[in-house]
Image (cartoon, grey):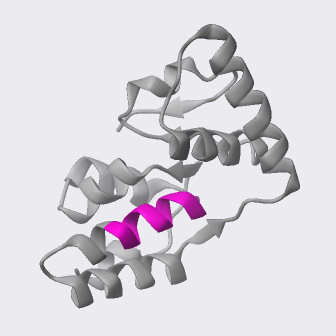
Amino acid sequence: MGASKFKQMSGGKFLLDTNIITSWLKGEKEIADHIEKASDVYIPIIVLGELYYGAEYSTQVQKNIAVVRKLSSQYKVLLIDKAVTIEYGKVKAALRVKGAPIPENDIWIAAIALSNNLPLVTRDKHFNEVGGLKFKAW
């Protein structure tokens, strides 16, 4: 992976889902162009865990772990704090009432996005079920 993929940006603020980061790392130019224009790019701690899992399960473990480490040093990783746990509770309860479950990790990712008032960039359509969540599909 070239260093150019990790340079600073200038435009909107975005929280990236795992599917966006993996597509970007596989060379999707459209995603790279959006990231290039962004002023701030954030990675949820849950996504970082999913990326480490993918690296550990890959055929090029050390190379992929190095890529994940570089990403986590280049972009701000958003953690789970008290405000995120409150959003998590609201999101999970609302989804249960609706009868519209989504994967547990994605509830946490949505809670991080909501708590930090950031649009989530994802290709997962089930995020439509989360009320108040702003998201973009690149």
Quadrant of the frame with the N terminus: bottom left
* Membership of 49 in magenta stretch: yes
What residue is rendered at 42% in x and 57% in y?
A: 35
In the image, residue 130 lies at what x, y percent?
A: 61, 23
What residue is rendered at 70% in x and 23% in y?
A: 132
Is residue 82 left or right of 21 when viewed as pictured?
right
Q: Main secondary structure of the magenta part?
A: helix
Above or below — where is 99 with respect to 95?
A: above
What residue is rendered at 42% in x and 61% in y?
A: 50
In the image, residue 23 lies at what x, y percent?
A: 25, 54
Q: In the rendered structure, which segment of residues is drawn in magenta?
A: 39-53
* Membership of 82 in magenta stretch: no
In the image, residue 93 lies at what x, y percent?
A: 73, 24
Is residue 51 left or right of 102 when viewed as pictured?
left
Can residue 74 be seen from the camera position used here?
A: yes
Quadrant of the frame with the C terminus: top left
Above or below — where is 53 with respect to 20?
A: below
In the image, residue 36 lies at what x, y percent?
A: 40, 60
Please identify the residue farthest to the top as the structure is shown. 98
Work out whether residue 105 or residue 78 is closer to the camera in this orientation and state it.
105
Can residue 44 be seen from the camera position used here?
A: no
Please identify the residue farthest to the left as the structure is shown. 59
Above or below — where is 113 with respect to 48?
A: above
